[in-house]
Image (tube, rainbow, N blue to C red):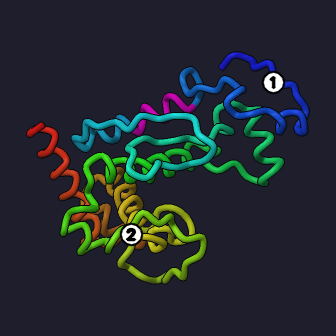
Amino acid sequence: MEAADWASLSDPELLERRISSLGLRLEGTALEPLIGQLYDELSAKGLVFHPPCHVGDEWFVPVGIPAIFIPFFLVHDRLRELERTMMLEVEGGTPEWFMKLMRHEAGHAYMYAYQLTRRKKWKQCFGQTSREETPDTYRPRPFSRSYVVHLEDWYAQSHPDEDFAETFAVWLTLIGWHAAGAHAGISRRRLRLSQRKAQNVLRAQTQA
């Protein structure tokens, strides 16, 4: 990205600026090839829908909207520096961390794009979803093998939607079921359901 006129501002000055005034975009940044990597992984699984990506204030997929919003502070080195100063870390600040979050958010995007939560099999495996946000606190079972382990803090156990997104993220990069069996914390039943959901998506695409 070209040098921004605000990059030389002090931290207090930069904090006064609106995100919308920074002129941020994903094109031409170090994030663009990583987004392309996600799309390649989806294509390798036979999934043709590539969720559009936008700059947002945090990591999220809006409820009901199949699009991924990437935190603004990842778009520019100066903003990463400010984020680290203010928050002591930069969520998604390494390529590996970024891709883990992108795969997770892609699961949410696919869930909304094809309304997977309406299907009986989905409810049987992941539970009844709701429009309520993921709770700030939950009591995980660290040794449970009913959930995949992808993001930290056993995040799959926080909400049915997160359970699916985490399962989707793990499934996306698995080569075969032998790999699944070797992956700590993997529930084969949930991974197989995720595979069936992907196959249903493919059928929906060919019938469209």
Q: Amino acid at mark 2?
A: Pro
Which element type, helix, strand or loop, lies under badge 2? helix
Q: State the residue in front, 92 or 17.
A: 17
Q: What span is in magenta?
A: 31-38
**Residue with the most extreme top position:** 2
Q: CA distance from mark 2 to mark 1?
A: 41 Å
> Residue shown at 52%/41% (left/top)?
69
Percent position of residue 39, x then y: 37, 35
Q: State the residue in front, 5 or 16.
A: 16
Circle on res. 152: none
The answer to whether 204 is drawn above or below residue 32 in the figure is below
SS majority, magenta: helix
Percent position of residue 195, x then y: 22, 57
Mark 1 crowd level (few <14, some 14–19, many ≥20, 10 Å Cα): few
Circle on res. 6: 1
Percent position of residue 192, x then y: 22, 64
Examine the image and state in which quarter residue 8 appears: top right
> Residue shown at 43%/52% (left/top)?
63
- Label 2 belongs to which residue? 160
The answer to whether 6 is drawn above or below residue 189 in the figure is above
In the picture provided, is 93 more to the left or to the right than 178?
right
